[in-house]
Amino acid sequence: MALKGADIMKKLPKTNCKECGCATCFAFAMKLATGGAKLDDCPYLDPEVRTELESAMAPPVKLVTVGTGEEALVIGEEEVMFRHEKTFFHEPGLAVLVSDREGEPEVEEIIARIHELRFERIGHTLRVNLLALSNESGDRDTFVARVGKASKATDLPLILISGDTDTLFSAAALCADRRPLVYPITAENVSAAIPKIKELGVPAGVKGESLDEVISVTSQLKDAGIEQCVIDPGSKDLLEGIRDQTLIRRAALKKGFRPLGYPTMAFPCFMYQDKFEEALAAAALMIRYTGIVVTSLTEKDLVFPLLVHRFNIYSDPRRPMTVEEKVYEISHPDENSPVLISTNYALDFFIVSGAIEEANIPAFLCIKDTGGIGVLAAWTSGKFTGEAIADFLAKFEVESRVKHRKLIIPGVAKKLKEELEEELPSWEIILGPSEASDIPKFLSEKWKA
Amino acid sequence: MAYEAPLEKYPVKIREVILGGGEKARKIGGENALPLHFFEGSLPNPPGLALEVLDTRPENWAPWILEPFEDVASDPMSWAKKCVEEFGAEILCLRLLSTDPAGKDASPGEAAKTVEQVVKAVDVPLVVLGTGDEEKDSQVLIEVARVCSGKNFLLGPVLKGNYQEIAQAALEHGHCIVAQASMDANLTKELNIALCKFFPPERIVVDPTSSALGYGMEYTFSIIESIKLFGLADRDNMMQMPVFADVGIECWRTKEAKESRDQGVLWEATTGITFLLAGANLLVLRHPEALRLIKKITTP
Ligand code: SF4
C-alpha cells in the first residue's frame, strides 16, 4: 500500500529549509509519495521516523534473490493481482526436486538432463532454473555429500530441503556463498534457525500449515532482521494453492500486510502422483502468483509446455510483443515457394506462421520490423509502406531466394498494393486474405509460382 | 497488525445458462466469485468441459489426437457416443466442418441431418459450431435450429455480421448462442448489447476468440479475465455472460502439439486450464486425456 503525500508530510520537520532541493517540506512529501525523491535527500529526518517511513514505503512484496551470478533467481516486487492491470514482473522459478536417495552418479545425470532443458523462443531463453535437493534419506552425511556434489555440478540456484535443522544448515554451510534457499523454516525450528540464517546470509523458505503459522514465523524472522524469505503456505492441492496464493498476494497488495509481503513457493511434486497432473497444477500455480514452483519433472515434453506457459503469462501486456525482423523459412521453402510479408507484431506473426504451417505449403514469411504494431497502424505511421517494404526486400536479398517475383501482402492493406506496384515494378503484388485463418485456403487455391 | 483473511465478495453473479434438456441438461456460470475461489464465494456449476466431434473425417490430425477416435472418426454418431460413454463427456461440441465453403461445402440440409442423428445417439447437451464463415454459418445454423427445434443447443459462432438472423432463429426454436467478438472486451460488450435488444441475456455465452499456448494464449487469458472482472467487480451486466473457449482446435494445429503425444496433451490441457483460471465457463477440448486432467485437478 503506497503512502500518501499528506501522511508523509505529517512526519517531516516542516522547516522548509530547502536542503532537499524542494521548495517546501510538503513538495518533498509529494515527490516521495510518487517515487520522485529519496528519504536520504532530507538530512533532518528523525531516525525513528525515517525507519518508519522506509518500511511504509517499501514495495509490498519483498524482492528476494536465491542463488548468485547470472543464474540467480530474483522474485517478488509484484504490484498487481491481474496481469492486464500492469504486468507481472518477475518470472517464477521452476525447480526440479532431486532426492538424496539417488546416488551421486544419478544426481549428476539428473543435473545434466536439467541443463539440457533450455530452449530458444523468439529471442528468449526458456529454462528450468533451480535444483531442489531433498534429504529424503534422513541421513545427514548423505545429504551433505549430495549437496556438495550438486553445488559443484551446477551453477543453478539450490533449494535445500531437510526436516532436520542441523542437517539443513550443515549442508547450507557448504555452499552458503551460493545463496541457497534453506527450507523449511517453521514455527518449531525458527528460533534455532535464526542465528544460522544470519551467520550464513542465506534466504529462508518459510513453511506454515496455515497462514497464521506463516505469519508468526516471518514476524520472528523480521524481528531478527531477516527479510529474505519465500513463503510456502503448505497447500496440499491446486485448489488450496489458489486460495493460499491469492490470499497472500491480496494481503500484501491490498492491505499492506507486511508479514505476508514475500514471494511464495509451492510443491506440485507433492500434490499429485501423476506427472501430467503435476505439470498442469504447476502451470496453474504460475498464473496464480507462485514465486517458485517445485516439480519432479525432467521430461522435455512435460517441461517445455510449462516454460512456454510461464513466458506467455509473464510477458508484458503493455508492450506489444515483437519478433525479430527477418525472412522466416517455414517448412523448408525452395525457389518456387510463395513469399508473404507481415509485421513483427508477435501475435500477427504467430497467427500467420501458424496458418502457413497449417496450409502445408512451404513459404518464405518476411517479417518487417514495425515496432510491434499491426499492419494498418504501421502503414499509417510509415513503417509498413511501399518504400519500407522495398528496402526490406533489398536488405534481406529476397530476390536471390526465389525465381518468381510474386509478393503476397496482408488483405487489409489495399492501398499498400498500389504503393508497392510503383516501388517494385518487377514484382507482382498479390492481395492476400484479410483474415489469417483464410491463408491455408488462399495458398492451396491461388498459389502458383 | 492482526491478520484477517482478505476475502472479496461480489454482490452480483455471472448469469447461469442452461444447456440441453432432460436429465443430462447442464448449467454453466452462476458464480459470484473468481474461478475456483471456493473459499470466498459460490460456484454452483463446475466449468463445462465439452469434447469435440467433427461431422466429417479429420484430415491432417497428428496420430495421437486421432488415436482415441480412430475407430469412430468417420461416423459422428459413434464418435459422439464414444465421447460420452467411454470418455465421460458431459457436453459435446459438434463442429460442422463439412459445411466449409472452401472444403466440402455440404448443404445446410445435410449438416442438419447429421446433427439430428447425433442428437438421437446421445442425450448430453450439444454445442453446434459452424466454420466461422458468416454467410454459410447463417444458413447452416438457422437450418439446424429449425430441424432440432426445442433441443436447447448452444449455436455458434454468432458474429457481428450474422447475429440477427441466427439469434432470431435460436430465439424461435429455443436455443442458446455463442456470441463471438475478436480479442477485444469492448467488442464483446457491443455485441451483447446489440443482441439483448431482442434476445434473452440468459441464453448468451460469449467467445472472445481463443488462441493456443505459445500463440497468443496470454492475450485470450487477459481478455477473458478482464471480461469477468467487468462483470463481477464493476457489476456490468452486459459482461456477466458465461465465457466460452474453443481450445482444442487452436492447440492441435500448433507444431508443438504435433511433435509428440505427451507434449500435445499438455499443450491443450495447459491452454485449457489457463482459460479456466481466467474465468472461462465452457471449454471445447479435443483429447480425452486433456479433459480428464483438467477435471481431476479442478474438482473439489
Ligand atoms: S530538507 Fe527536509 S526539512 Fe528541509 S525542506 Fe526538505 S524535507 Fe523539509
Image: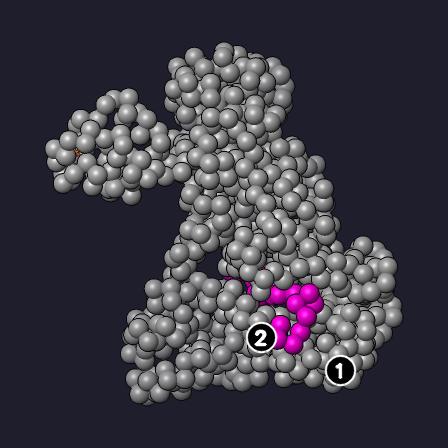
Q: Which of marks 1 and 2 is nearer the N terminus?
A: 1
Label number found at residue B194: 2
Q: What residue lies at 58% left-to-right and 65% top-to-bottom?
A: B238
Q: Position of residue A9 (x, y in %)?
A: 26, 35
Q: What residue lies at 31% left-to-right and 87% top-to-bottom?
A: A422
The residue indicated by pointer 1 is B143
Number of other residues with Cα within 10 Å of mark 2, as a class: few under 14, some 14 to 19, many 20 or more:
few
Q: Position of residue A8 (x, y in %)?
A: 28, 34
Per the image, is A223 magenta?
Answer: no
Q: In this view, does A362 lie to the left or right of A18?
A: right
Q: Give the SS element for disc 2.
A: helix
Label number found at residue A375: none
Front position among marks 1 and 2: 2
**Quadrant in which residue A242 is drawn:** top right
Front residue (pair B84, A333) = B84
Q: Is residue A82 left or right of residue B119?
A: left
Within 8 Å of ligand 1, the CB of disc 1? no
Looking at the rendering, the stretch of residues picked out in magenta corresponds to B194-216
Q: Position of residue B67 (x, y in %)?
A: 75, 60
Give me the C-alpha separation between circle 1 and circle 2. 23 Å
The answer to whether tags 1 and 2 share a subunit is yes
